[in-house]
Amino acid sequence: MSPSSPSRLPAAKPKWQALLQSDAAAWLVLLIALLLTALAWFNARHRVQQSGNDQFVSAASDVQQAIVDRIHAYELVLRSASGLFAASDEVGRTDWRQFVLAQQLEQHYPGIQGLGYSVLFNAADKAAHERQIRAEGFADYAVKPTGERARYSAIIYLEPFNWRNQRAFGFDMYSEPVRRQAMDLAIDSGQTALSGKVQLEQETKTDVQPGFLMYVPVYARGQMLNSVDDKRQHLRGLVYAPFRSRDLFGNLIPPGALPLHFAIYDGDTAQPERLLFDNTLPGRWQPAWTRQVKLAVPGRNWTLHVESTPGFERAIASNEPEVSGILGLLTDTLLFLAMKTFADRRKRIEQRARQLQQELTAGEQRQRDLFESSPNGMLLANAEGSILMANREITKLFGYSQQALIGAPVELLMPERFRGTHSAFRQGFAQHPEMRPMNRRPILLGQRQDGSEFPLEIGLSPISHDGETLILAAILDVSERKRAEAEVAKARLLLNSTINSAVRFSIIATDTRGIITLFSAGAEEMLGYSANEMVGHTSPAVIHLADEVNARAQQLSAELGRPVEGFAALVEVAQRDGHESREWHYVRKDGSILLVNLTVTVLHDEQGQVIGFVGVAYDVTEEKRVAAELQAAILAAEAASQAKSDFLANMSHEIRTPMNAVLGMAHLLEGTDLSSLQREYLTMINQSGKSLLGVINDILDFSKIEAGKLDLQQIAFNLGDLTDTLSSIMSVNAASKDLELIIHVAADVPATLFGDPLRLQQVLTNLVTNAIKFTEAGEVVLQVRQLQQNAGQHLLRFAIFDTGIGISDAQRERLFAPFSQADNSMTRRF
């Protein structure tokens, strides 16, 4: 039947339903599914490519920034060297050597060949210059290259003064055009300037590398430098540094980073003759990603070419498109097979439904029984706060009768001082309904009919009913638990007071080297050392187990890929994350050991520089003991609950066995010669036995739920097929009373659902059977509507309407009483 409008259930199968069960429909579904799979594969491939490009661009940007940062760091070294000249009238060769040694070039500045100082002079001053340097102990000194020039420069300081740098001693950099251009730019601008690509004087015939130089001008102290002429007139010399490109950029990408190949060219274009550095792969390797950008370095422009490597492409590779395609094909195949076997499966479902028809019981009554028999108080209220239903446990908790509660406001059940704020909370919950507990505030109180108050916990669940939001509240009296918690809190307070009086917090601060700078009184009391013994003399290592510190150091070394030793093992994570909390064993002065929780925090100065660390520790021995006892209690309680549930499930099976024996004997007796009166008695035995067996089966289902063994099916089914089956089952009963049976499925209800069709049909059969039973004339309508849809989840409402006798307000009070009917006189009529 069509889901868009109500109609009488047809006697024959509709054409569209027969078409859906045909082979053509299965092939059509397969074709559509294959197209969707191809689309999913294409989208996954596009996402993988886009993700790879984004990672490459990010990694290439990191390389670009690393180059700029390295050049800037070396510029700062030259700036500090020029500051040495600015701070004194004369800087001697020894002063220069000491300054360079302090920089630790080989350790901190890879690729730099040294720090040098060059002076400029005219041709008339050349001879005097050479005599001066020779007088300093360099007898063979001469400006090189030889030849007559109007203006000279000469490298007079160059440290470290090793064999390689001695080759450049006395070299006239101003004689070479590329160097002269950079020197003039630095002199005239007063800024740092890089030269173009050159071959350094330090190079030999082996391992020759492209090079370049960095210049910073040094002017006479206290002079005005407002113009280019001023700067040229007051120039003292130039601080400079020579660089070999492969030494400088060879280790630019740190270990652990995604590997990339890159090349650096001097100038605005990537010309081979201007290549400064290149670690790209020769041969036929075709990178998936390349990027070329311009770099602005002091006084020049460089061109950076970056390309992906095989290792980079393997690291970011993803098999998502292949997995998507394979899973799609498998799903398409399964869907096709499901469509092919749909008709047979439907027949099996119908046959199973007919077999179970006699075993169905009143599902609605069971739900009411569950509501009434809940060990917690249960309330159902509308958005306005009026109570619609209340179970027996509520009457026990609050002292009101069910009749007094129905229609009353929920605020009746709470102290008057809370009623105003609760009204606002209820309105907010109605606007944004969601399942939530109400036990977060310090105390939540209920008020009984006699005015007494008691603590409680409430769990709220929203229920959508016919477009209206209802509120289901589960209420639990926690008086006993609160009393127990109060006793525990009192005991814990006493325990904490005892602990605090014996073991205070230990606060220890250190500088960046690990030397203790603060040792609190709590630390003195906890560890037995005095502050005078510790401050300025030792590190926290003396109060730690050496094996524990070494094990932590090895763990961090493996994680970080670099050595971590000694005091660094205590502060490494805090330096990275700002703080770290971790359990350690402390060793007291007397040699005893205690377990503490130590929180290490980094100390910064106003500029954000790390100036030290502070560790706050407290004894956690008692906490560990309490946690172990609590875990043991939880395990014992869970075991007791499981034993109860297993017993109920097993006993339900045992009760069913003798009843089956009774029915079996009755079946054998039916085949013997009996009088009519005996056969009437035998029929009553069979009917009563089957009815009792149904009750036992219900108990078995309930026991399975308690034992966690009842499995609800989660399968795909067709709602139209289910309603057709329901029509076939109910149409005979409806026709016998000349009633019209109508099923209306709203247009937005999906045709295919996922759930347990058998249980759903049981419930609907019970409801429709009950409606037909109590309707003398007119119609019975089953209406299916969609109330909510979210991320593939559909909330449906099944409603039964009839023109029967209905239920009066007085009789409605008895609906949820177990084993009772609204009006016992009806049993004679229905």
Image (tube, grey):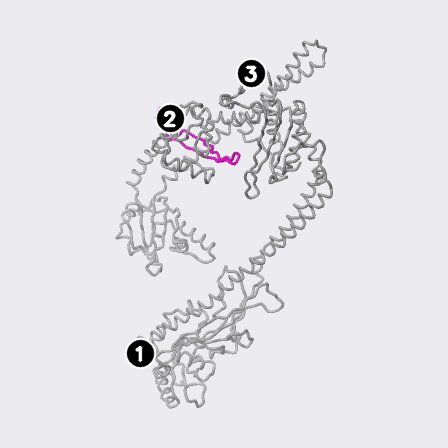
**Residue flagged by tag 1: what amino acid is it?**
Arg
Residue of label 3: 825
**Residue 95 in view:** yes
Residue 221: assigned label: 1
Q: How far apart are the alpha carbons under marks 2 and 3? A: 37 Å
User: Against 99, is 358 above or below?
Assistant: above
**Residue flagged by tag 3: what amino acid is it?**
Ser
Helix, strand or loop at label 1? It is loop
The front one of 544 and 450 is: 450
Q: Position of residue 746 (x, y in %)?
A: 60, 37
Is residue 460 magenta-colored?
A: yes
Say which quarter of the image contains residue 619: top left
**Residue flagged by tag 2: what amino acid is it?**
Arg
Q: Is residue 33 toward the left or the right of residue 612 in the image?
A: right
Helix, strand or loop at label 2? It is loop
Residue 448: assigned label: 2
Tell me which segment is drawn in magenta. Answer: 448-477
User: Against 376, is 171 above or below?
Assistant: below
Helix, strand or loop at label 3? It is helix
